[in-house]
Structure formats: C-alpha cells, structure tokens
Image: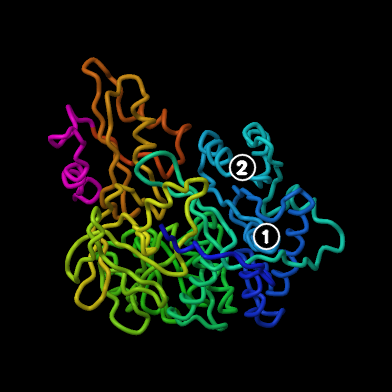
Amino acid sequence: MQTPKARGKTSPAGNHFFDQIRARAPSPDKAFIETSDGRVITYGGMLRRSSELAHALVKLGAKPGDRVAMQTEKCTDALMLYIACIRAGAALLPLNTAYTIPELEYFFGDAKPSLIVCAPGAEGDISKIAGDARVATLSADGGTLCDAIPENAADFTPVPRGPDDLACILYTSGTTGRSKGAMLTHENLASNARVLAETWHFSPDDVLIHALPIFHIHGLFVATNVILFAGASMLFYEKFDPAQIIAAMQRATVLMGVPTFYVRLLGHKGLTEDATAKMRLFVSGSAPLLPETFHAFKERTGHAILERYGMTETGMNTSNPYDGERIAETVGLPLTGTEVRIAEPDSGKILPAGEIGVIEVRGPNIFKGYWNMPEKTASEFRTDGFFITGDLGMIDERGYVRILGRGKDLVISGGFNVYPKEVESEIDSIEGVVESAVIGVPHPDFGEGVTAVVVRAPSSTVDESKIVSLLESRLAKFKQPKKIVFVDELPRNTMGKVQKAVLREQYRGIYTAR
C-alpha cells in the first residue's frame, strides 16, 4: 500500500525545520520568551542557547537519528533542548512529567533513546531503567546537561535533515496494546506551523500567553512553533493560574488553552470584557469544549473561543475560522492543504455531508507512521494515503466538522489522552476486583472525567479509597479515575462485548448533576 511517506529520499542540503526558523527570525534583540519572573530571552539568545545545548548533546553521544528522551519540569532550557535536538539531527521524545517509573520503562525500552534528560534528583531511578542510554539532568537552575556545554559553543552547524527526516516521537494511546510512538517529521511540524500562523493571523506583533505543558503537542509544537514561524513573542508560565493569566492579558494578544483553562477563567471574578479588551484571539483544543463554556465565555468577555481539532499523529487538521462564524460544538473547517472526509469505518466508502462516519485526513501534516510498528501503520491508512483517525464525526452543509464520538474509546481528560485498557488492567489486578470498564464522561473542568465502573467479587470489601490508593503509585495522576462506581455486572451485547456506550450514557451526568 501507499502511505504519505512512501517517497524516495534525497540528500538534504540543509536542516529543513531549523532553516525555516532561522529564516523567519526577527531582529536578534526582539523578545522571544519572557518568563514569569521577568527574565527575557531574545531571538538571538534562543539561537545561542540552542547552539550550546546542541553541542552538549553531541558531547554526550547523541548522533543524528538518535532519540533524546526528555522528562523535565517546564523551563526555558527544556524548550531550547527541543530546538537543539532539531539542530543536532536527533529526534526528541518528550514525556509527561507525571509518568511513573514502570511507564517510563516501557517508553525507554521501545524507543531506545541514546540520551535521557530528566529532572535533578530523578537520575538515580531513571538510571536503573535507562538501559544503554546516558542520563543527564536539566532544570531551570541548570543540570548536568548544561555542565556538558563545551567552551566556545555559541555556533553550531545544523546537521542536514530533509523534510521526511524524523524530528520527534510522541507516544499516543489506542484501544489495543501499549502506547504507540507517532513519528513526526521536519515537514510535519513545519507545514502545520506555517498554516496555523496564517490561519490565525499571527504577526511579529503578537504576544502569546503560554501556560501549557511542553511535553504535549499543543504546548510544544502548536504554540511554540507558531510563535517561531511568526517571529512573535510569548509570556512563559510554568503553570496555569487564573489571576496571573488575566493580569497577563493586559500585555498579550493570544491565549492557547484547553477547556479546563476557560472553565477556571470563568470561575474568576477578574474575567471581564475590560480585562480581555487587548486580546485578539482565544484558542481551545486537546479536549471537547462544552457549549455552555463557549457561550458563557462569549457573554462574559465578548470573545468567541476558536476551537480546533488535531491529534498527536497529525498536528492540527481543522479550525473554526478567524474571520467568520465560530460555531459551538464544531471544530471548524479543514486547514489549507489538509483534506478531511467522512467514511464508513469498515468499507471505507466515502459518505456525503450530514452522514456520520469515521474522520479521515490527508496532508503534509500527517505523521510518518508508528515507531517500530509497520503493520499497525499500514492498517491505519487507506490505500490512497488518508489516515483513519478513529474519531466519529460528520461534515455539515457548510463544511464545518463535528466530532461526535470516538470509535477507539479513547478518553481525553484535561487535554491528555488516557488509554482505558491500561487503567482497566491495573484495576483488574487488585484483589477483590472481578472486572472493570473505564470510560470518559462529560466533566465541567476537564472536558472528560476518567470514570471506572467496577464489579467486585461477592465477598470483597474493596472500596473506592482502596483502589485510588493503589493506583497512585502505578499510574500518572491524569490517568487515575476521578470517580469509581460499583455495579453487580457490566452491560454486554450478544457477543459478550462490554457496551461502553451504555455506560457513558448511564453516567454522563455524574460530574454535572446539580
């Protein structure tokens, strides 16, 4: 079969992604990042620091094509490490800071990084599962990665990389097996950044409020790359604090966030039309935005939140228009260069407007495939190169895309993907549990709340607090159920399959009931 990346390779003359960053860079003195404590990194400073860290990567043995894993706190040097990997020809493997040692062991074993960069204090535990990889540390205060920077490291010649060369591996979840590593290329990242900067009318005058994590595609690639490609600036916050964000709106023009951000802003009395008067754009993604949040925010501020649709494997695919009507419960129109269609899941038959099916996408933003999974990669593409997202949706008569569910039962909570089978396996291993089903249902703060429906053994006394306490050391916080419900049996169809749709409907009001 043919996939989007089945083209012949050519010898690159330069570094495809970095060359575009450098070509678009404004004056070296222009601010690229301002931190919460007032420290400013200019575009010239970004080029110097990423050069220094690229030298450090090489000194620590990272070669072109190698994977560099990163699990660190959000800091400016972590962002510079991303750019340094691009310059050095390595593929960045960003990892959620909430991942536990057992979870990290799987990622390291699968991706086989040559270098692992972690937070100071974690290197002891990380070294035990690092295999042949070297381990370095990095934080806002420095670390052994910074110590490895040689003298006279201000200029690093970028390693030649072409459009199809690997830039990053992001692990994502499905419905079978463990997490899969989505391989994103230089052109995947560059094409998405170019289109988004144009679609959302970014210019060098823009100032983005960046309060997202940088181990996720939203904060690391969408937010950061758009700024780089527009030659704009960002206010860089380690975490989301409503009062701090509202104050920053006096100096900023754009906020990119997840639905949780907007729910929490609405809960702060400082969110007013005057407070947002200097802002030109509010973007939401990574989880469904409830219509009540959309309408409440517009009524309170006069701004219509722009919702868009993307995936780890594809970057952004669609967006509500910048100029034009932004419609609640839709994710807008296909981005320039990206084709979106609706098909019957099994046959692949293309469906007309208004009919529900699986969303399929094709374009320069679509990933190269899954790391070390050629058969899985092939099964996720149609023969004409369209990627089967697994999301169910429809395209209305105006061309707006509506997402109506997920055939893969993936839960998106607070912008993070949660793989139900992984959580179920941990719960099912607990003494006194017969079986469980993990679902996502509407949550006013997180978009979807991870919810476990559990069947106990007849004589068991295991309760919610017991299960929660056992999961704390075995799963990242965002994967842990927010509620656990006990039932006598799970609903099944005639083939014995658990009917999660029935459970989602039964418990859809568990977090919103008054």
Tag 2: Cα neighbours inside 10 Å, few (<14), some, or many (≥20)? some
Tell me if residue 408 comes above or below residue 43 in the rendering: above
Q: Which residue is mark 1?
A: 89
Residue 477, visible in the rendered structure: yes
Which part of the image, by quadrant, shows the N terminus?
bottom left
Tell me if residue 203 comes above or below residue 415 in the rendering: below
Tell me if residue 403 comes above or below residue 112 in the rendering: below
Q: Name the spot of residue 135 as percent of width and height, x first.
A: 70, 42
Q: Is residue 499 magenta?
A: yes
Quadrant of the rendered structure where residue 312 is? Answer: bottom left
Residue 40, visible in the rendered structure: no
Tell me whether the residue at label 1 lies in contact with that at label 2, contact meaning CB atoms closer than 8 angstroms: no
Q: Secondary structure at mark 1?
A: loop
State which region is magenta.
Answer: 486-514
In the image, 363 versus 382, the foreground residue is 382
Q: Which residue is mark 2?
A: 112
Overall secondary structure of the magenta stretch? loop
In the image, 398 versus 209, the foreground residue is 398
Tag 1: Cα neighbours inside 10 Å, few (<14), some, or many (≥20)? many
Q: Name the spot of residue 169 as percent of width and height, x first.
A: 54, 53
497 relative position to 57: left or right: left
